Image (spheres, grey):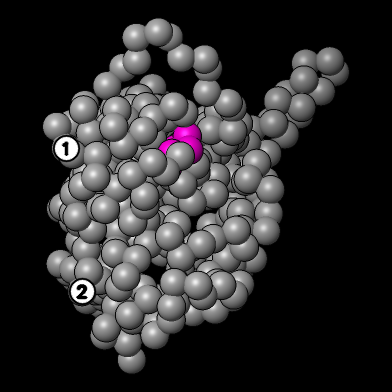
Amino acid sequence: MKNFSSFIINNSYIKIFTILLIVFGINSGMFAQSQNKTYLSYIEKYKDEAIRQQKRYKIPASITLAQGLLESGAGNGKLARESNNHFGIKCHGVWNGEKVYHDDDEKGECFRKYDNPLQSYEDHSLFLTSRPRYSELFELEITDYKGWANGLKRCGYATDKAYASKLIGIIELYNLNHYDKEALKKKEKKNFVEAPHTPYTSWELLYIEARQGDTFNSIGKEFGIKPRKLAKYNDLPKDAVLTDGMVIYLEEKNKYSKKGHKYHIIREGESLHSIAQKYGIKLSSIYSLNEISSDYVPQIGEKLKLNRKIK
């Protein structure tokens, strides 16, 4: 009788486990060592970028990683391999960049193509922050990955009914919410010898992230650029106080937005300057496009033009 009861209990666990796999849409092979290595390798490769995106755009790193894993098949999907599109973002009629066509909900749908995966990560953040339908997500706690997962499904990111469950399953299986907390931690005190800044590319522009204590003089000396030029590139005075994590472009910004982003919905705490930095465009262009002056006060919820081609 004891053995029979044990069999029933064990069999129940197997059934529950199988149901979870079906609900989450996770193939049992995911738990095999080879599949685990694929997922873990992807996480290791892109976790720093996901953390960087959280710091810049307030999107949980866990959500970014989970969506990247799910949408791209851990980087092995055709769209990711051939087009560097890791989030399955379609053209949506406003994309001015390179395009590819794949069968999805319908045949021959238009998808965005990127020069590299990091551009896909950046565009994913901008896609969420620039569309009003996702605005409710940014009212959630940054560590509320379940709220974000359910919100993405509710707001229409994907048609899959189990989309939220899949994201939550991946996050919990790989403990991705650890990176949300890591991104919130204060940076440790710096050593006396500071490591060089790492240049990144966004909007076809080189930029770095400023550190506490940085000045245009110190950055200019490191990269061989005159401080006055750096200040002009970033629409700031030469003696401006640079805050930790601030985006500093190393070349002149674009006149208009790139990659099809035509407008931005102003959110709480944003300034015209922070928006200009976010999209890599000149502050003067924002004034001109929106017919406003330098003393304009941004209004939450207002649609701000970023490009001349507005329907």
Quarter location, residue 136: bottom right
Q: Which residue is mark 1?
A: 225
Q: Amino acid at mark 1?
A: Ile
Q: Secondary structure at mark 2?
A: loop
Q: Is residue 201 magenta?
A: no
Q: Is residue 177 above or below residue 308?
A: above
Q: Is residue 245 magenta?
A: yes
Residue found at x 43% / y 39%: 242
Q: Residues within 10 Å of mark 2 (few under 14, many from 20)?
A: few
Q: Is residue 107 above or below residue 279?
A: below
> Quick check: 10 left or right of 233?
right
> Quick check: 175 left or right of 274?
right
Q: Is residue 120 above or below residue 239?
A: below
Viewer-nearest of labels 1 and 2? Answer: 1
> Quick check: 18 left or right of 42?
right
Q: Residue at the far right: name it.
A: 1
What kind of secondary structure does the magenta stretch mostly adopt?
loop
The quarter of the image holding the C terminus is: bottom left
Q: Which residues are magenta?
A: 242-246
Q: Secondary structure at mark 1?
A: loop
Q: Residues within 10 Å of mark 1 (few under 14, many from 20)?
A: some
Where residue 91 sits in the image (x, y, percent)? 28, 73
Where residue 26 sits in the image (x, y, percent)? 48, 44
Nearer to me, 276 or 258: 276
Q: Which residue is mark 2?
A: 96
Nearer to me, 74 or 204: 204
